[in-house]
Amino acid sequence: MFLCPWPGRDDNRGPSRPFFIMTTASVVREKMIALLEPLVEQLGYELVDIEWVSAPRSAILRVFLDLPAGREGHVGIEDCERVSREVSALLDVEDPVAGAYNLEVSSPGFDRVLRKPTHFERFKGARVWVELNVARDGRRRYTGNLSGVNAQGITLDVDGQVVSIGFGEVGKARLVA
């Protein structure tokens, strides 16, 4: 957060009122995804998601990676170390965020984030949790089986009811046990 002089004040006495400019976690997240996704894919992995956690003295950048669809096995510690070294080097050169932060690289875990249409397609038939950007008919969260995926969105079977959700409506989505 930066404190800037109020626009239009020219008497050199400082700000008459605070004018705040904030960098939000979602802006940092999107910036990091755009920067890191090509590198992670070049290394032979899939960038599942990025999490930016702000803290007073040092933030945390969490990078979640997986093996691409069709590649057998799982992400191990050696994979995380390799990606961590390369991502760290890129971040040192590009310096996309001011201030100190710690880099953590890991596999996505059982509650894997579904961020792109290809993620939904890969896990068709799985049980998922979806939170909408804006409530629909007073409801914002759905948990059900991912029964369909097309170019426009997804279809869930929620307690015997079919619910269609456009990709643009999805705020967050992840696998659930």
Image: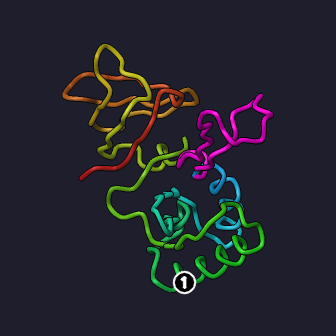
**Nearest to the observer: residue 39 or residue 85:** 85
Residue ranking furthest to the bottom? 78
Secondary element at tag 1: helix
The residue under the point 51% across, 46% down is 115
Position of 118 relative to 107 (above/below) = above
Determine which quarter of the picture holds residue 17: top right
Residue 2: within the magenta?
yes
Position of 170 relative to 22 (above/below) = above
Left or right, residue 101 beside residue 38: left
Majority secondary structure of magenta residues: loop
Residue 134 left/right relative to 26: left
**Point 49% across, 44% down: residue:** 121
Query: In the figure, residue 162 lies in which quadrant?
Result: top left
Q: Is residue 89 above or below residue 123?
A: below
Q: Nearer the viewer, residue 124 or 168?
A: 168
Q: Residue furthest top?
A: 137
Label 1 amino acid?
A: Glu
Among all residues in the image, which is located at the extreme left?
A: 159
At a point 66% along the width and 39% down the height, the residue shown is 15
Which residue corresponds to the image point at 52% horizontal and 58% vertical from the top-left? 50
Image location of residue 103, percent across then percent down: 53, 73
Task: Let me know if residue 111 is in the magenta part.
Answer: no
Total residue callouts: 1
| Image coordinates for residue 111, horizontal then vertical, percent | 33, 56
Question: How are the colours assigned in the image?
Answer: rainbow
Q: Magenta part of the protein: which range?
A: 1-28
User: Which residue was labeled with disc 1?
Assistant: 81
Q: Nearer the viewer, residue 13 or 17?
A: 13
Q: Position of residue 49 (x, y in %)?
A: 51, 56
